[in-house]
Structures are given as C-alpha cells and as structure tokens.
Image (tube, rainbow, N blue to C red):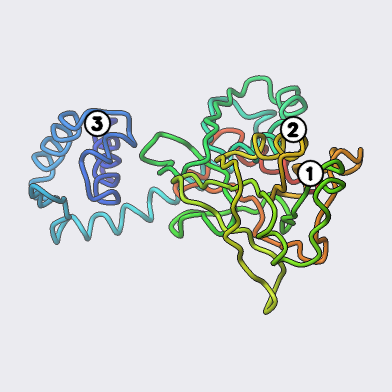
Amino acid sequence: MPAFTRADLADLNVFMTIVRRRSFRQAALELGLTTSALSHSMKNLELRLGVKLLNRTSRSVVPSLAGSALAERLEQGFQTIAEALAELDTHRDAPVGRLRLNVPRDASRLLLGPVLPGFFARYPDLQLEVAVENRMVDIVADGFDAGIRFGGTVPRDMIAMPLTGELRWIVVASPDYLRRHGRPQAPGDLLQHPCMRIRLGDNSPYQWELGNGPQAIRLNVSGPLGANETDTLVEAALNGLGLAYCLELYVAVELRSGRLEQVLPDWSSMGPPFCMYYPSRRQSQPGLRQLIESIRALGL
C-alpha cells in the first residue's frame, strides 16, 4: 500500500472540489483559497502522477478520461472518511469547533432563539456563526456548513433533515381593524381589504396560498405595505393597518393574548416543514447533529 503525504491528500481534495464545482473560482471560494493556489496544487498533482487530470477552457473545467476514473474512486474513499469522522461524535463528550449556518429570519426566531441557551450550556466548546437572510444562497460557495429553509426550496443535491412538522399559514388582523372594516367571510373578500404584501428573497411578490388540496387557491393581494420579513408585516397588522399572512407559529403569542385574530380559519394552508440542509460530504460538521436534535425536541 503506497504511503500518502499530506500534500497528496490536500491536492486530491482540491481536485475533487474542482471536479464537483466545474470551476476553479467556485472551488476556491469553497476551500477558502485563491484560484492561483488551486492551479498550483493541480499542476503539482498532475506532475507527481504523470497524468493529465483536468481539461480547462476559458469557460469550464472538466476532468479528463483518467481524471473521471480517479474522481469516481476518490468519491467513494472521501465518503468513507466522512462517515468515519462523523462516527467520532459518538465518542466525544461534546462537539468542538465552529459551525456556520445560513437561515431565514423566521427560522432564526422560531427555531434558533428558543434552543440556543440550552444548546450552549450543553456544548460550551462549540462556536456557532449564523447569517440571517431571506434570500437563497449557495451555502457551499458562500462558505456555510449548513442552512435552514422551507422544505420545498432546498436544492435537490443537498441532504435535507426536517426540523418541524408541516407548517400552518394563516391570515390575521387586529380586533380593532376587524371592528372598523368588518371580517372577510370568503377568500375573495381579501381583495377588498388592505393586505400586507410578502416579498420573497429575490424581491418578487408572494401570492397568498389559501386552503389545501383541490380547493387551494392563490391570491395576488394588494395593500399599502410590502416587506421581505415577517416582523414588519405582523407589526403593521397589530397596529391596525390591514391583514397579514404568516406562519401560525410566528403569531402564537399574539393570538393567545387576543392582540391578533385569525381570519378565514377554514382557509388556513399547510406547507412544507423547516429543514436543515447540507452537502452530503459534510456529515461530520461539529455540532450539526446535536443542533438538529435540539430543534426537533421543540416539537414544532
């Protein structure tokens, strides 16, 4: 069995990243290196092996015939290494290291906020860095270990682990608004009321989804306010500006206190759960499994 140097393993990892990303620039972003450093690594690797591994053009990078064969075998080996490292978590008293997450604002409030005090009390040697933003990002290219999104929006090449059950979306308004303007009795009535418009991460408008199954409908509502995060929309509803559409979980306290009331309860809509997602090759990220378990323990 041949002996491997540290340079061999590092360069093979660079090679696999380039093959997967089909781009020196994207691979450099993922690995936190410069494109010139990656080019230097590949030249050294090809020189040591005596075989051309990559065919590079001005637009793309593709493996050679020999490179494709090597990549296929290496994928199996790196997967075995990742699984072996992941199993080490069962032998540690607590995870150690840094975990970088990208999450939408709703998930930050509903999922991370409630669990973090207890989580850090149990795992004091873990560092968690969270970027809160509603726009979709490439978590690999942007250097994140994992992300949280609604199940229907997770990229297909990622591993997705549900954190909650299906989520209920509802329409709410303040009692004062309903006294002044009346209570909608059917979905079409919403078109006669000022509605807080949701903006998605790409700034496109979100149509309100009402009902489930064959009876489900979508409404392109209108109103004086649009925002890309829930706090602003709910606050406007609390102040009597109009109707808001949001997760039932997000306004559970306001509903119990009577500060908000659900409108058209028979037309609530069930949607995909929040999911933690990550590349399959990153199964051994410190604390990820424990964080997933902590969030699931909320029972949402």
Marks 1 and 3 sit apart, C-alpha to C-alpha, by: 43 Å
> Residue 157, percent across and down?
43, 57
Residue 211 occupies which quadrant of the picture? bottom right
In this rendering, the answer to whether 94 lies above or below 146 is above
Q: Secondary structure at mark 1?
A: loop
Specify whether residue 90 is in view: no
Q: Foreground mark, 1 or 3? A: 1
Residue at mark 1: 297
Amino acid found under the numbered disc labelled 2: Val
Determine the residue located farthest toward the top in the rendered image: 124
* Mark 2, other Cα within 10 Å: few <14 / some 14–19 / many ≥20: some
Residue at mark 2: 115
Sequence-earlier tag: 1 or 3: 3
Q: Is 281 on the left or on the right of 195, as rendered?
A: left
Amino acid found under the numbered disc labelled 1: Ala
Q: Residue at x 76, y 34 (%)?
A: 239
Q: Foreground mark, 3 or 2? A: 2
Sequence-earlier tag: 3 or 2: 3
Q: Along the line of sight, which residue is nearer the eye, 127 or 249?
A: 249
Q: Which disc is residue 68 wearing?
A: none
Q: Is mark 2 in CB contact (under 8 Å) with mark 1? A: yes
Q: Secondary structure at mark 3?
A: helix
Specify whether residue 221 is in view: yes
Marks 2 and 1 sit apart, C-alpha to C-alpha, by: 9 Å
Residue at mark 3: 7
Residue 216 occupies which quadrant of the picture? bottom right
Q: Residue at x 71, y 62 (%)?
A: 270
In this rendering, the answer to whether 22 lies above or below 144 is below
* Mark 1, other Cα within 10 Å: few <14 / some 14–19 / many ≥20: few
Q: Along the line of sight, which residue is nearer the eye, 208 or 150?
A: 208
Q: Along the line of sight, which residue is nearer the eye, 22 or 174?
A: 174
